[in-house]
Amino acid sequence: MGEEQFKGVFVEEALEHLTLLENALMELEETPDNMELVDSAFRSMHTLKGSGAMFGFDVLSHFTHDIETVYDLVRSGSMKITQELIDLTFCAKDEILCMLRNDYDTIPEVQKKKDELTKEFKDLIERYRDGGNGATAKGTLKKPDGKSIPDEIIVKDIEAPRYTYRIRYRPCTSCFLRGTNPLLNIEELAGFGRASIVAHMDDIKFLDEYDPDACYAYWDIIVTTEKEIDAIKDVFAFEDESSEVKIEVIDVSGELDGGDQYKKLGEILLEKGDLTQDDLDSVLGLHKKLGELLVEKGVVNADIIEAALAEQVHIREEKKSQQTSVEETATIRVPADRLDTLVNLVGELVTVQAHLTQMAVKRIDYELLNVAEEVERLTCELRDNTMNIRMLPIGTTFDKFKRLVRDLSKELKKEIILATEGAQTELDKTVIEKLNDPLVHIIRNSIDHGVETPEQRKKVGKPPKGTITLSAIHSGSHVLIRVKDDGKGLDVEAIKNKAIERGLISANAELSDSEIFSFIFAPGFSTAKEVTSVSGRGVGMDVVKRGIESLRGSIGIESARGVGTTITVKLPLTLAIIDGLLVRAGAGSYVLPLTSVLECIAISKDEIDQNHGRELTMVRGQIIPYISLREHFFINSTEPVNQQIIICEVNARRVGVLVDQVIGEHQTVIKNLGGIYKNVETLSGATILGDGSVALILDVNRLVNLVEGVERDAVKRLGMASEMSVCE
């Protein structure tokens, strides 16, 4: 690996540490006394400093040194977390991001900002350097003997050891009379970690000797926990002196001898004192299991054997769980371009597999068809696994917006918190990368137009702090991402009046609320009375819609006046390979994404002619408009007698697409059309069929929007022509 590759690895790790730092700072604003968060911020800075020096980022290393010193003072108790320190660290984090750029040294404004921040951190150090509690002039800690503790010892993140204890607990027989319940002690031990408990009943008396107020049972408990032995002893602090409590440490983090097999049964029994060496020797050599022999000879009872076997199983499972946790955390970094190459190769394999299946069916070769079916099964598994590799949790994107909400709400003098739900919902990495900008616009819009100021919220009986909820949830082969605010909601009348003013609708048009809300996605549309640094120019929501539609997604709005607004983005899980419906119109083949298809219905040429050019059909009492692919793509060949209408869902509406023939479902590998066709809005790509021919992939959302736009323009031109004729 060359020097540049090493630097690339450092930059990736540095970005991860900066994300951890930002998350810690966001939480520290709410809980400034949380020392775990302080330690997290300190470790991030320390790692950046050390790794930066190692990979030649000396400026970054020197810059983070002073920040690290400040957080070391906080850790030692000489300084408190303040809003000033958090704001300063946020600025430093942004500066470090700039330092990771290749052109950092050539930007004088950024260099000036770095020097100003360095001075502010040094001032903080000078102000608190003599605060005591072990802080020295350099911000390092000291031992009781006055010697400095090296940095690597301070920041070493040592995982807490896990102790496994063997406990023999025999409460005194009169414990019930003293008001003691032994089961409470056992439950407390079980709450410390993973526990194995065996109850012994061999001391219970016969009925003529049985005392109902006496406790005859005793227990063997094996518990694995991070708590030290003093915590175990504290459980039995109020036990009577006549009670037997024997505590032994039998394993520490899986490091003691024994391996997966742990100790043999005889060794455990000897250690616990339940068996003597003579008794053990008397049964060794016989051809039965040791436990069975010991019980048969009456040396120990079955409960004692059960307790020893439970200990074996407990330790074996503990070692296995520790090995599994290590294996689960093993990851490997793979460059994104290699992953994209793998997906492209899988796509080519899907195409070849379709060709093989088609050839086997044509030849009526059953042996070849069996092979083709097996190849299809393996290809599907390979495709699914490859797609899963590309899937990433959307939580990493969600976390970025916490800083956006914090900074923007401060700028607008509002109090807003960002709540997230469904952070583990997974999406294709390409979708996540392209989703960032649309979500930024939506959230900025919610902060500026949606959530009111604290004073306005108090007047209407709302809490002064507003909430924006960012959530994600799977819905079939899609993901629904919602941005919900508890603000003032959209003003239906204001939007309608603006639409009338701009000539988008007539003054007497009757529209539903959802249709009126859709106007905010029109280019240049804004109801804001003032232009702010955030919004008001009518730029943003039209960009959002174009961005979402480029991902083959859709966007919808729900709003209630005075309650809030919810914007829902519906996106496909992946952009690389989709399940489609293959259709024909004329001599051409087309693919509609199967996720948007609801049903297919047959329609005859006579029924189409009876509508006198109106592209409408009745489906179970509902009138549904449709678009003819023949008309849209100017196909002049003879129309078949019977055609098909594919009913699709577009922006929460049912719209049909008229085609000549439905071929069937088709696993579609999406290929770009190239620069020549980049302005063809109704197509999202192409795919290669099994026979080598090309099928165009339709973007149903854009197709419907384009046709509706053309019709609106035609109506507008017709209205203008009518007005001119009246004037004449």
Image (spheres, rainbow, N blue to C red):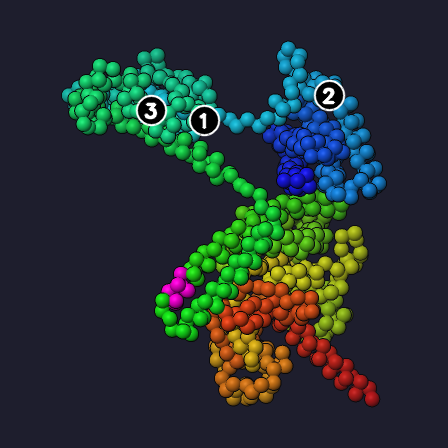
Whether residue 372 is in magenta: the answer is yes
144 horizontally vs 381: left or right = right
Whether residue 439 is in magenta: the answer is no
Q: Which residues are magenta?
A: 368-374
Q: CA distance from mark 2 to mark 3?
A: 51 Å
Q: Secondary structure at mark 3?
A: loop
The residue located at (43%, 61%) in the rendering is: 375
* Labels 2 & 3 near each other (Cβ < 8 A): no
Q: CA distance from mark 1 to mark 2?
A: 36 Å
Closer to the camera, 359 or 128?
359
Q: Residue 263, which numbered label?
A: 3
The residue that mark 1 highlights is 253
Percent coordinates x, y for residue 460 in the rendering: 67, 50
The 10 Å Cα crowd at callout 2, few under 14, some 14 to 19, many 20 or more, is some
Q: Secondary structure at mark 2?
A: loop
Q: Amino acid at mark 1?
A: Ser
Percent coordinates x, y for residue 574 in the rendering: 56, 58
Q: Amino acid at mark 3?
A: Lys
Comes first in the chain, label 1 or label 2: 2
The residue that mark 2 highlights is 138
The residue furthest top is 145
Q: CA distance from mark 3 to mark 1?
A: 16 Å
Which of the 4 image quadrants contains residue 286?
top left
552 horizontally vs 186: left or right = right
The residue located at (42%, 18%) in the rendering is: 233
Quadrant that contains the C terminus? bottom right
